[in-house]
Amino acid sequence: MDHMSQHLKSPWVHQLVRSRPVYTLETDLVADICIIGGGISGIMSAYQILKDTDRSVVIIDSHEVGHGATGHNAGQLVASLERSIESLVEEYGLEKTAELLLSIESGWGILEETMRDAGLDVPYSTFEGYNVYSTKKQIHDQLKDISLMYQAGLTPKKMYISQEHVAGLEIPSLYTQYYEVIPHTSILSLSQTIDPGYIAAYPHKKGCLNSAVLVEQLATYLVQTYTIDRCKFYEKTLVTQVQLDKDIAAVTVQSGKTIAANLVMLCTNGFENFTIHDVDNNVDHTFHKHVKGVVGYMLAQTEEIDQTPSAFMYCDAEYDTPNATSVAEHIDVKKDIAYAGDYIYTTRRPYDLGHQESKNLFCIGGKAEILEDSSVYQKSHAYNAHVKEEYEAFMAKTFDHKEPEPNHRQFIWHGLMGYTENGLRMVGFEKTNTLLMYNLGCNGVGLLPAIWSSKRIVALLKGDTTKSLFDPI
C-alpha cells in the first residue's frame, strides 16, 4: 500500500460524469409503469419500453442511477450462469435449457444495438476469455456441460487440457471431441498464471464494460429523447410501500407522495426495504424466499497499459468443497448458488483516471458473504479486511508480480447481489397479481441476462404468452 493511493469507492462510480440534475419526488403522479430501481435492469427496461411501446414510465431510485449493484460489480460481460448446464438439464430438460442459454447469448446483440441506436460512448471490449480449472472433477463437469451445449445446438469451443496431466484425469472417451491436449506451459500462458496447479482452460467470449457509465448515458439519452409526459426520473427517493389493488397500483415514497400506476416493476436487489400490500393478500410478502442478499467484495488496481483486455475465472481445489453452512443445512448448491463454492474472477481493461492518465485497471472478485436480511446492507459498511488479504495472497500466488509505480491507485469496494431461489434471473409478471412485474436477480453474472430481460419485459407487455425458465416461480 505504500506504493499507491487507495480509494474506498467503486472505480465504476469514480468514472461517472453526470450532467443531469437530481430530482426527488415532491408531488403525486400518474404513470403507466413505475420502475423501482435505476440500475441496468431498470434503465434497460425503461429504454426498451419507451422505444417499443407507447407507455409512460417513471423511474425511481433510492440513491442515484447506476449507484447500486450496477456501479458496484466487476464489470464483466459473459453469456453464462453460475448454475451448471447439467443441473439445468436435469431439472428442466435440454430444450428449455437451450432456450435459456440462447436468450442470454442474444444479450450481446441487444447491447450493441442499444449503444449504436442511442449513440452511447461507453468503452466496451470483447475478447476470448478463459475459465481455468485445477481438478479432475472440475474438468469432467465442464466437459459434460460442453457436450450438453452441443446437444442443444450451440457451438462451444473445445477445452484445452495439459498434456502432462491428461492421462491422470481419466476422461471418458465420449468427451474426446470436446477437448484438445496442449503443453502445460501453454495452459499457464493462456491463463496468464504462474501457478502450476491450473491444468485446463476453457475459452469463450467475454467482455468488459462500465455498466454504471452505460446506464447514466442511457438515462441522459431517455431524458433528452422523450417528453416529460412519457419519461421521468426521481432519484434519492426512497420507496416505503407498494399497494396493489384490483386495477391500479400505488407506490408511496418517504415524503408521503404517491405514484399511481397501471404496473409496478421491481428492478432492485434492495426491495426488502419497503412493504408490498396486495388487496387479496395473495402476493407472498416473504421476499427473502425469492431473493437472497449476497455481499460481493472486489478489489482493483491500476497498471501500465502493457496487456490487452481480458477476463478469467480461476477455480482452485477449494472450489470443489461445499461450505459448512450448505453441508449443515443440506442445501443443494447446484440450485441455491449463493452457497456454491468460491472461485476468483479477474478482469483487465483500459481505465481513464482523468487528466490524460490512461492506465489499465486490473480487477479481482468472487469472495462474498450471505446476508439473511439484505435490508440491513449499506454501501458504507466496512470492507472485510480478511477478504482483501485473501485477494492479495491469491495475486501473489497466481500472477507474476510487478511492483506498482507510485502514481498507481487501488480501489476496494463491495456490492449487494441478489440470488434467486432457483439460481436463475426472475423476469415477468407476479402470478397472483399482474400489476406487479419482476426483473431482478443478478446471480453474480448479471449484465447480459439483465440486458436480454429488457426485451423479454416488452414482449410480455405486448401479450407474449410463451414460457421461459426466467418466469417468476
Image (tube, rainbow, N blue to C red):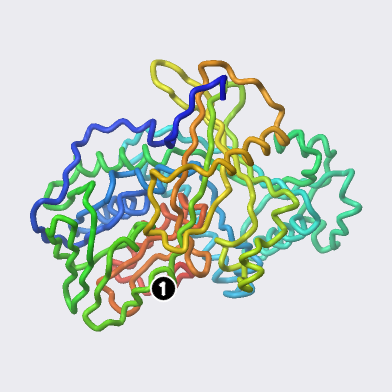
Question: Where's residue 233, x and y in %?
Answer: 20, 48
Residue 318 lies, with reference to residue 335, above or below; the image says above
Left or right placement of residue 191 versus residue 414 in this view: right
Residue 230 lies, with reference to residue 240, above or below; the image says above
Q: Residue at x 34, y 51 (%)?
A: 44
Residue 207 lies, with reference to residue 276, above or below; the image says above
If the image is split into quadrants, where does the N terminus sit? top right
Q: Name the residue beneath numbered marker 1.
A: 466
The crowd level at tag 1 (other Cα within 10 Å; few <14, some 14-19, many 20+) is few
Q: Residue at x 77, y 59 (%)?
A: 137
Q: Residue at x 79, y 53 (%)?
A: 135
Q: Which quarter of the picture shows residue 254?
A: bottom left
Question: Where's residue 201, x and y in %?
Answer: 73, 45
Q: Nearer the viewer, residue 330 or 306?
A: 330
Q: Nearer the viewer, residue 79 or 38?
A: 38
Q: Nearer the viewer, residue 437 or 204?
A: 437
Count of number-bearing discs: 1
Identify the amino acid type marked 1: Thr
If the image is split into quadrants, where does the C terminus sit? bottom left
Left or right placement of residue 33 versus residue 295 in this view: left
Q: Secondary structure at mark 1?
A: loop
Q: Which quarter of the picture shows residue 3?
A: top right
Question: Where's residue 158, x and y in %?
Answer: 73, 50
Please identify the residue farthest to the left as the structure is shown: 27
Question: Where's residue 431, x and y in %?
Answer: 35, 77
